[in-house]
Amino acid sequence: MRTLTLLLSCLMMSLGATDDSARRLDSIFNYLIAANEPGAAVLVIKNGKPLVQRSYGVIDINSKYRIDSQTNFRLASLTKQFTAMAVILLVHDGRLHYEDYLSDIFPDFPAYGKTITIRNLLNHTSSLIDYEDLMAKPYGGTLPDTVAQIKDAGVLALLKQEKTTNFPPGQHWSYSNSGYAVLAMIVEKLSGKTYGEFLYDRIFAPLGMNQTIAYEKGKNEVRNRAYGYSKENSAWKQTDQSPTSAVLGDGGIYSSLEDLAKWDHALEHHRLLSAAEMQPALTPVQVPDRSVVGPDNKPAEYGFGWFLDSYKSHKRMWHYGETVGFRTAIERFPEERLTVVVLCNRSDIAAQDVALEVADLFLTRR
């Protein structure tokens, strides 16, 4: 594995990476360079080719194995772009339509499912109640770490016990992990495969993403796995799993820089779907009430699994991920043919901010 990593690094240098590029990245992550602590992996792709890849820190503080381009991190909400792709593939197959209703797929769903479309689930306008809030209800609103892990099917079961949504679907934008857990169950219902099997058969295997999996404890293993950590009282504590970590559709995929480079290539060259079929995913949702803002404090511009607001006049598609012990981000600037990926196995790095700091090093000034 280490030989392959060395070869990949040499390839990146031959494709145009320079010592200056590496130094500029190191200047951002300099506090991680020599640390035997949880760290980060960073990839810059320019003009369709890896330009520079840098890794900092260790996969876990016991083994002290160094992070590299093949280290697999929990992607957290970067997972949503893969869940969305799975749904679009079902539309491509003719098994699903964006205007189908939730109750069309699950006839036993309560009456409020008759007002929620697949499109609402994809672009976060379904207004489904957050499953973490539902899990926390019996505990006075705070979910203890000792609660048994819930899975996507459990999320669907919780939502079937509810009578309504937070607001009429389609009227507002509200980020919904519940919606993407439900989408994973729709993939399973319509494909006849598990969520992980469908993603492997239709996305990961065709693209050669051989290290990427939807992790299910006891069913599969994450090779070259990074473990998540948080700082508590000046010491690192492994915070790799929580009661919600077994939910797959909203955040359960593990992947590496090496595999995400293949994903980026597939998106640019329409390996899985045509440009026309991808267009709905890259069209910002329009809602009557624009008062709800996204993570950058502007009215949310979201497609299917991607935020779509521009950055310094540069068109972009991007996402961030946050879960216990992990912070992740991907920033794609299609017109610049620039992609930045930041994967961290520590909770004290704002990966989306760092990714933009890296992007600033390579974006054309406007």
Image (cartoon, helix red, strand yellow):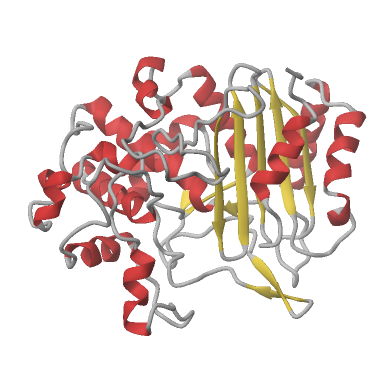
Q: Position of residue 3 (x, y in %)?
A: 77, 42
Q: Is residue 75 left or right of residue 249?
A: right
Q: Which image quadrant is residue 365 in?
A: top right
Residue drawn at x 63%, y 22% is 314
Relative to residue 84, is residue 161 depicted above or below? Answer: below
Q: Position of residue 361 (x, y in %)?
A: 80, 30
Relative to residue 220, is residue 355 depicted above or below? Answer: above
Q: Is residue 33 left or right of residue 256?
A: right
Q: Which image quadrant is residue 19 in?
A: top right
Q: Which image quadrant is residue 57 in?
A: bottom right
Is residue 256 visible in the rendered image? The answer is yes
Q: Is residue 280 left or right of residue 32?
A: left
Residue drawn at x 46%, y 34% is 301
Count of all numbered marks drawn on residues in the image:
0
Where the C terminus falls, by quadrant? Answer: top right
Residue drawn at x 47%, y 36% is 306
Is residue 70 visible in the rendered image? The answer is no
Q: Position of residue 145 (x, y in %)?
A: 49, 79
Towards the viewer: 31 or 75: 31
Q: Position of residue 160 (x, y in %)?
A: 17, 63
